[in-house]
Amino acid sequence: MNITVFTASLKHHLSAHMEHSGSILYSAGSTLKAGDVYLMGFNPGGDDNPTYKHPTISEQIDTLATRTTNAYLDEEWKGKAGEAPLQKRVTWLLEELGYQPREVCSSNLIFIRSPNYRGVEYSLADECWPIHEEILGTVKPKVIIVFGNSVTSPYNYLSKRFNAGSQDESYPSGHGSWVIRSFKTVIDGRSTCVIGLPHLSRYSPIGKPDVIEWIKSKLIS
């Protein structure tokens, strides 16, 4: 990917949000390359506070090319770096699937930060989508793994955008009535499977080997 061109595109599509707190990538800039998996959350969480000010979208764009950290491994969300439940679940999931978490391109459907999904307009996903199209054109993933598959979620957004309809499948998550959902689509002529987990801030796949095997089957089918 041409970072200069990508940066210009980011500034164009996100011009109305440059001074808002947010994040483009959760992974290093070097993950903007071909890979099997594209990982997508809903939007960056957390509040600005007196001891730590989250960077703005503008600042994130300016440092994208030199970004070497991974939010799931290196950021201190609760206690030590990488030790928050969501961080550990993401790391565990990717490792169980056979991938190095640092090598997986990771982002969010919506780049603007809010304390929770209720604090951000779902319609902002449309403004961010052209950026995801550019990322997908570079990563060319076999699967897009998203966390959150309810009505307001990255999975539901992708399902509508790609007209999943009757292709939608579900599999027991191992947690009550929650399910994992998936559908197959074609992106730039490539077969791609979208897998929607329950949100990993509340759902843990750890200790559920059948879930891992089901996800793996989507990687090879």
Image (spheres, rainbow, N blue to C red):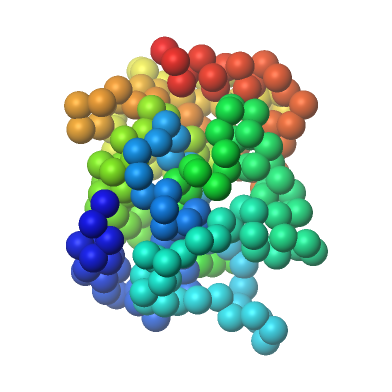
Residue most toward the right?
79
Left or right: 168 as drawn, with respect to 54: left
Left or right: 12 as drawn, with respect to 217: left
- Residue 119 % position (x, y): 52, 65
Residue in view at x 69 percent, y 41 percent? 89
- Residue 87 % position (x, y): 67, 50
Left or right: 164 as drawn, with respect to 55: left
Front residue of 141 and 174: 141
In the image, is residue 216 above or below residue 147?
above
Residue in view at x 42 percent, y 77 percent? 59
Residue 27 in view of the camera: yes
Front residue of 177 and 144: 144
In the image, is residue 59 above or below residue 207?
below
Residue 156 in view of the camera: no
In the image, is residue 67 above or below residue 93?
below
Image quadrant assignment for residue 191? top left
Residue in view at x 47 percent, y 68 percent? 22
Q: How many marks?
A: 0
Residue in view at x 35 percent, y 44 percent? 33
- Residue 180 % position (x, y): 57, 26
